[in-house]
Image (cartoon, rainbow, N blue to C red):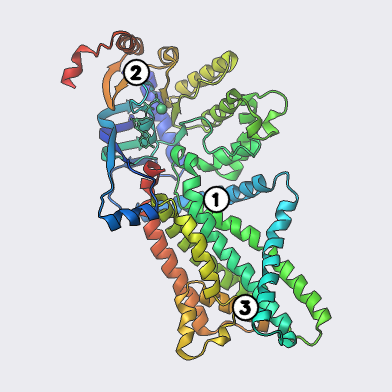
Amino acid sequence: MNLTPERWQNAAVANTQKQDESFIPLIQVFEPHRASLPPLIPYVKEFWRRRTFAIELARFTDKAEYLGSKLGKVWLVLNPLLLAFVYFMLVTVIRGGGTSKNGLTTLAHILIGLFTFSFASSCISAGATSITTGGRLILNQAFPRALLPFSSSISAFYQYLPTIPVYLAVIIIGKIFYPKTQIPTLSWAFLWVPVIVALLAVTAFGLALIFATMNVYFRDTNKLLSYITRIWLYASPVLWLPEMLHGWHRAFLYVNPLGPALAANSSIWIEGKSPTTSELIGCLVWAVIALVFGGYFFTSRERDFAVRI
Amino acid sequence: MPDDLAIRIEDLSITYKINVDTKRTLKNAVMRASKGEKVRMRKVEAVKHLTLDIPHGSVVGIVGANGAGKSTLMRSIAGILPPSEGRIIVNGKISTLLALGVGFNPALSGRDNIILGGLASGLSREEIEAKTDEIAEFAALPDGFIDMPVRTYSSGMYGRVAFSVAVNMTPDILLLDEALSAGDASFKEKSFGRMRELCAEARTILIVSHALATVTELCDVAIWMHKGQMLAKGKPQEIVDQYLKFLDVGALPSNFEDM
Ligand SMILES: Nc1ncnc2c1ncn2[C@@H]1O[C@H](COP(=O)(O)OP(=O)(O)OP(=O)(O)O)[C@@H](O)[C@H]1O
Ligand SMILES: [Mg+2]
């Protein structure tokens, strides 16, 4: 190759300068792999280093989606709100109308349950398609692919946040019309909310990793997922109360990855009660299982994604 | 690996697996399993046993017919496609412009896309914000277009932004795949200038181009790829001449048998 000696030297100088400027491993080796994990510590470091990318991607995607439609953001809140009223009517009718005594409590339970459930389910469903719709980005940039479902989770969280004031507004207005209804006063128990929501988010992110990987191999996974989500909603303590389960039936709550978190969340908001130990353990165990299993499933296959997109 | 090498490629092969039959869906998989059929896979060997050393500071041009495996090679150097066999060692920070509009979101403005592109390639928020104006200025879009949605751009404007992002990342290794094709004459002149600057700073550049003049003008070494193999490597003018002769009369170089 026709390199002059000066240029060789220049190259060497430039090379040593860079060593201390950046802490990314400068020498990268790409080798064949067989469904094995990428080196975990560099992966996690790189993931963490590029977290702003995931956050900004979520922000910009939302911006692009609601650009020009002012009503877009309103629908985000209105949609679960209307859904909640529909389910509320349904539940009241099924129970035979005689629930005016604790009608507001039922409504509150359905509202907060539905809002929180839609947070988890949109983490999962948006995350599931994040890889297959990110084709261009995946084919043209090398980065830890888990950032894409992570970005979807952040986006879902941004959409979840404004539902909390909506919930509070509904409850306060309801209290004015039904002054006899017990609503919890502000207590330390509410400090558990961020903990429970964080554990729920981790669980949902882990599940999103699993479905995102499956969706690369089977493109109809996300269609299947929409049915799964619906069944999942009925199987979760949203339209029914966790207290309705007795004895060994309570196990039903714990085989559902979202069950313990939704139950704990509802009892904080409705009764101002701190989560029980078993609920906490349930949340924690599901979060760990989902993250470890989903993380393994996803990262061991993610280098295949570019070939299969 | 010797210190002066930017990229070392050892016996690299890359195979795409293409499912021939139907769409990959769960439904089809279940149907097929119930009938006891097997999935028919076709293997496309896009790169075959390629060995190549690229020293720091060299500007390498890659030519070859459509489907020769040029883009595939570039993607594997960027760490996007894993090798099926062999090994790639890369020494340095890579910036890629592999196809026009790397992850560009058409609903967002050019400026937002620059920020997103920079973050995707691993810059921090402050770093990319400091560079955004410089990049926007380099792209030199007509009045105020940089703050308009990208979907309103012409393909040349699109290409300008993408190219500006890639060359302003201060990469050690710059991969350009058909990057210069969309710009007009004045932008082409400017981008040639910028690339010469990058060469002078001893950065390594790989250029895939069907505009053979680009290769002869900018590169100090050229590679001819044909059906996944490297047919020839040498002085750009010689390689381009050989390649043109091949396009004319279909003559492969005489030493092809040895490779
Ligand atoms: N995503 C993919 N899935 C399956 N096969 C692919 C994919 N991308 C490329 N190929 C195949 O790999 C081979 C090499 O393609 P590649 O894109 O590397 O060619 P190229 O040299 O860049 O061509 P061009 O000059 O048209 O850009 C082709 O035979 C192509 O069909
Ligand atoms: Mg190509």
The amino acid at mark 1 is Ala
User: Which quarter holds ligand 2?
Assistant: top left
The answer to which of B18 and A173 lies nearer the viewer is B18
Horizontal arrangement in the rendering, residue A100 relative to residue A213 (left or right): right
The residue identified by callout 3 is A266
Question: In percent of the image, x 27 and y 18: which residue is there?
Answer: B232
Q: Is mark 1 within 8 Å of ligand 1?
A: no
Asked which secondary structure carries label 1, the reply is helix
The label nearer to you, 3 versus 2, is 3
Q: Chain of mark 3?
A: A
In the structure shown, which secondary structural element does the residue marked by tag 3 occupy? helix
Task: Give percent across and percent down for residue B76.
Answer: 36, 36
Q: Amino acid at mark 3?
A: Ser
Indicate the position of residue A192 as horizontal and vertical percent values.
60, 76
Q: Secondary structure at mark 2?
A: strand
Coordinates of residue A14 in the picture (x, y in percent):
43, 30
For residue A241, side relative to residue A46 (left or right): right
Compared with residue B227, is residue A261 higher up or lower down, i.e. above or below?
below
Is residue A204 among what the camera can see? no
Identify the disc placed on residue A54.
1
The residue singled out by tag 2 in the image is B222
Nearest the camera: B207 or A137? A137
Q: How many marks?
A: 3
Tags 2 and 1 in contact by the CB under 8 Å rule? Answer: no
Residue B15 relative to residue A122: left or right: left
Which of A8 and A186 lies nearest the eye of the viewer? A186
**Residue farthest along the front direction in this orientation:** B35
Beta carbon at label 3 within 8 Å of ligand 1? no
